[in-house]
Image (spheres, rainbow, N blue to C red):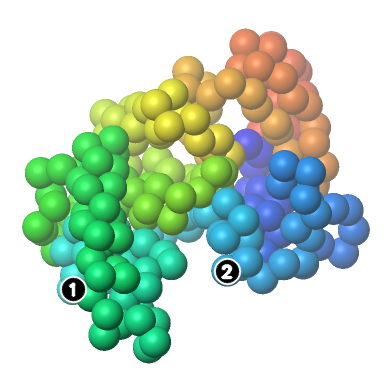
């Protein structure tokens, strides 16, 4: 967390391969991923969402998840005509999609078009698409930005559910301190591109640096 201009989105863009950092290194499970292309980073296990969701609006919620399935032999010219090479995979992909919809709370929207969803539901759809990619780390940029407090708690509860049930790490950028603090394990506060302070939520809310930086920016 941190005020506007503190470097949060820049950090996320470096981690996800959109930017290449001028200094420093980025590691995933001991592997240097600095400067790798976004699609390479996704294959290694890091996926990210954006502040403004961008689904395929004309497709259903189910199809938005299914298109994120990868390594489908049916999409390759050499094996597409041999049904046995991809039929079972696609059946397992549908099962996985249905399971993920339950995890993110969109099972009742399975056949709805993405363009019909509310802003909060689109945030949940973004989480579902990350899970379909099989990521180890979700980098989530302002998951409750612009949604009402009740829905914000619902979205964060689903993120916590993903962590607890699937063991997936979530790195979250968020401004709404009053809501997000009860859901996170550890907090880093950025200011001017540097870590101003860090610790558990209980430790960070007691640091004067946190309040000073927001008051200064305010």
Taking depth in this image into account, of 104 and 196 the one nearest to the observer is 104
User: Residue 9 falls in which quadrant of the image?
Assistant: bottom right
Per the image, label 1 sits on a secondary structure element best described as loop
User: In x, y percent, where is residue 154?
Assistant: 29, 30
Left or right? Give the position of 83 relative to 131: left
Whether residue 83 is situated above or below residue 102 in the rendered picture: below
Tell me the quadrant of the picture where the C terminus can be found. Answer: top right
> Which numbered disc covers residue 58?
1
Per the image, label 2 sits on a secondary structure element best described as helix
Q: Which residue lies at the image location 28% right of the left edge and 56% below the top edge? A: 93
Residue tagged 2: 39
Whether residue 175 is situated above or below residue 83 in the rendered picture: above
Count the numbered circles shown: 2
Taking depth in this image into account, of 141 and 83 the one nearest to the observer is 83
Taking depth in this image into account, of 13 and 218 the one nearest to the observer is 13
Q: Which residue lies at the image location 62% right of the left edge and 56% below the top edge? A: 44
Question: Which residue of the protein is positioned furthest toward the right in this rendering?
Answer: 23
Q: Which circle's residue, 2 or 1, is located before the other in the chain?
A: 2
User: In x, y percent, where is residue 184?
Assistant: 53, 24
Whether residue 137 can be seen here: yes
Taking depth in this image into account, of 102 and 44 the one nearest to the observer is 44
Tell me the quadrant of the picture where the N terminus can be found. Answer: top right
User: Residue 107 falls in which quadrant of the image?
Assistant: top left
């Amino acid at each position: 967390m941190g005020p506007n201009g503190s470097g949060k989105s820049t950090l996320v863009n470096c981690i996800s391969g959109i930017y290449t950092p001028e200094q420093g290194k980025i590691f995933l499970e001991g592997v240097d991923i600095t400067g790798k292309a976004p699609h390479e980073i996704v294959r290694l296990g890091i996926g990210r969402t954006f502040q403004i969701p961008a689904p395929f609006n004309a497709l259903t919620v189910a199809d938005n998840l299914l298109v994120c399935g990868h390594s489908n032999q049916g999409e390759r010219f050499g094996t597409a005509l041999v049904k046995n090479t991809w039929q079972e995979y696609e059946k397992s992909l549908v099962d996985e999609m249905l399971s993920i919809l339950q995890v993110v709370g969109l099972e009742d929207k399975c056949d709805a078009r993405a363009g019909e969803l509310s802003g909060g539901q689109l945030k949940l759809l973004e989480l579902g698409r990350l899970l379909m990619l099989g990521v180890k780390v979700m980098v989530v940029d302002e998951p409750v930005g612009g949604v009402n407090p009740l829905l914000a708690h619902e979205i964060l509860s689903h993120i916590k559910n993903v962590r607890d049930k699937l063991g997936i790490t979530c790195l979250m950028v968020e401004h709404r301190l009053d809501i997000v603090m009860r859901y996170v394990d550890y907090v880093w506060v950025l200011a001017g591109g540097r870590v101003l302070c860090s610790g558990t939520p209980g430790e960070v809310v007691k640091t004067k640096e946190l309040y000073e930086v927001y008051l200064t920016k305010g």
